[in-house]
Amino acid sequence: MGDIKSAREIAMEKIAGLGEPTEEELLQWKYAPEGEKLAARYLKDGFDLATELNKFDKAAAKLVARSASSILIKNINIPKNDIDKKHNKLAMDGVKILKTDKPKVEAALNQIRHIFNHYNEQGEQQRKQAYAALKADFQAKLEQALRQQMGGNISGVRIDVEKQPQFQEEWRKLKTQLESQYFKLLDEYKQELDLIN
């Protein structure tokens, strides 16, 4: 029977097998957190991103920009209110500053803007129609159930369908289903944007 190794011994063997990190890996480990901090400060304060980036040497600036742009891209979300719209604009403006392939970046951002416009225009209309249809269907089912319980006479009985927990739950499910197409498409465009230099 062989010796049983401790978890520490196993971990040390794995670390030894990894080898020494490359110069680029060391720089990445050093400057990726700087990019993350820069993106967070930019989203909070909205300062001149290009000026801050110029404080780094060329090699470091590239790594900081890559890390910062990834964070900014993650912060682009479906705009549900004016605060979200301002936040998205700031993040998208930052990405345009940090990425070097401006035409590809602008094309990807235009696709994202198109999703946002569709969500706010046609998507809003779809949600309103779906809500009205669900409410009417739920109302009819509720009235049918009441007729069966009360022997057919439900005159004078008023029930606010929208306040029913079952209705609210069904609406949440339906709304999530309607919005999932937007989130899926946005995620695809964000991944595409993240791969652009």
Image (cartoon, grey):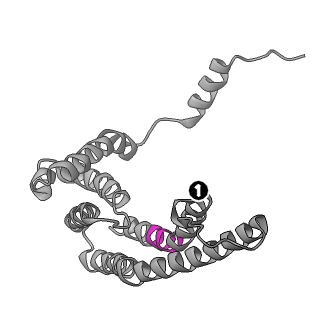
Residue 46: x and y, percent?
14, 54
Quick one: label 1, few (<14), some, or many (20+) residues within 10 Å?
few
Kind of element beneath mark 1: helix
Q: Is residue 143 magenta?
A: no
Quadrant where the image shows the N terminus: top right
The residue at the point 26 percent across, 55 percent down is: 65
Relative to 131, is 164 above or below?
A: above
Q: Position of residue 79 (x, y in %)?
A: 33, 67
Between 3 and 22, which is closer to the camera in this rendering?
A: 3
> On the image, which quarter does residue 118 sit in?
bottom left
Residue shown at 60% from the left, 65% from the top: 170
| Residue 28 in the image: above or below residue 1 | below
Name the kind of residue labelled 1 in the image.
Pro
- Image x and y of residue 4, in percent: 79, 16
Q: Would residue 186 be counted in the magenta stretch?
A: yes
| Above or below 106: residue 56 | above
Q: Which residue is at the far right?
A: 1
Question: In this orientation, which residue lies closer to the viewer: 14 or 175?
Answer: 175
118 relative to 27, above or below: below
* Residue 144 in picture, x, y percent from top left: 72, 73
Q: Residue drawn 31% across and 80% down?
A: 110
Residue where numbered disc 1 is placed: 165
71 displayed left or right of 38: right
Exactly how many numbered labels are in the figure?
1
Residue 2: name its quadrant: top right
- In the image, the segment drawn in magenta is 180-188
Q: Quadrant of the C terminus?
A: bottom left
Most common SS among magenta residues: helix
Given residues 20 and 140, the one toward you in this image is: 140
Horizontal relation, residue 142 to residue 87: left or right: right
